[in-house]
Image (tube, coloured by chain):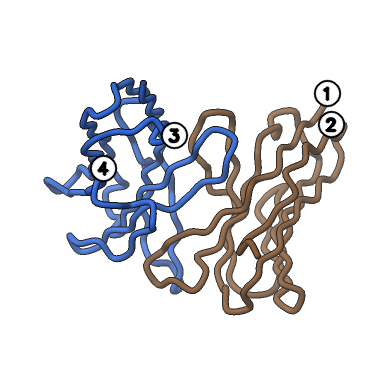
Chain colours: A brown, B blue
Amino acid sequence: QKEVEQDPGPLSVPEGAIVSLNCTYSNSAFQYFMWYRQYSRKGPELLMYTYSSGNKEDGRFTAQVDKSSKYISLFIRDSQPSDSATYLCASDGTSNTGKLIFGQGTTLQVKP
Amino acid sequence: EPEVTQTPSHQVTQMGQEVILRCVPISNHLYFYWYRQILGQKVEFLVSFYNNEISEKSEIFDDQFSVERPDGSNFTLKIRSTKLEDSAMYFCASSVVASGGHEQYFGPGTRLTVT
């Protein structure tokens, strides 16, 4: 079983739509979760960093962690064409060295 | 805003040659990492480095790989004898420990092409 899993998509939405991106993870001991945005052939850009269960909001982005179902989500409100990218979820698992375990990434296209 | 930088952006080398990829982490960060991403695949952890020593490495990080912090600002990844399958994007990252976790910031990557 993969430790962090994402549906690779692609996901295509019209501009202004609310986007929901999702990940599951396998180990209930995982505590820290991140969402990164990656444009083609660029480095991952940290969007959200969350600990344990609950919601965290930053502008148009909301990250949600549900530890009971081992499910993490990223919501993007009022999506823009510039949001078109691959979104990676990650966890530092059970490591205390910072090793990140990434999902496959979901490719999002926002059409004008 | 501080950022992680990497050089070169693209490196082409022949199989069997040594390459050194360079990174300048964010200045107040204490933890440093290398990851790689083969085209179309997920980002994979290679190694973490703290207090001038490797704190964790993956199965990928075999004897052909080494890391070094030669001075107070640079962090390097050396591949001793490159193979075709080493062709990938290599990302450096750095972090501080925030609320117990490692909030990592990535550089733009070095695209390594082994021919």
Q: Position of residue A35 (x, y in %)?
A: 61, 53
Q: Give the quadrant of the N terminus of chain B.
A: top left
Q: Which one is closest to the eye, mark 2 or mark 4?
A: 4
Q: Earlier in the sequence, mark 3 or mark 4?
A: 4
What mark, if any, has residue A112 been given in the picture? 1
Q: Which residue is mark 4?
A: B77
Residue type pointed to by label 4 = Leu
Q: Chain of mark 4?
A: B
Label 3, label 4: how far apart the Cα atoms are: 13 Å
Q: B99 left or right of A60?
A: left
Residue type pointed to by label 1 = Pro
Q: Which residue is mark 2?
A: A15
Please report the residue visible at 72 percent of the width from the left and 44 percent of the height from the top. A8
Please report the residue visible at 74 percent of the width from the left and 79 percent of the height from the top. A68
Q: Are marks 1 and 2 in contact (CB under 8 Å)?
A: yes
Q: Are marks 3 and 1 in contact (CB under 8 Å)?
A: no
Nearest the eye: B71 or A62 = B71
* Snapshot quadrant of residue B31: bottom left
Q: Chain of mark 1?
A: A
Q: Are marks 4 and 1 in contact (CB under 8 Å)?
A: no
Vertical position of residue A59 compared to residue B90: above or below: below
Q: Which residue is mark 3?
A: B89
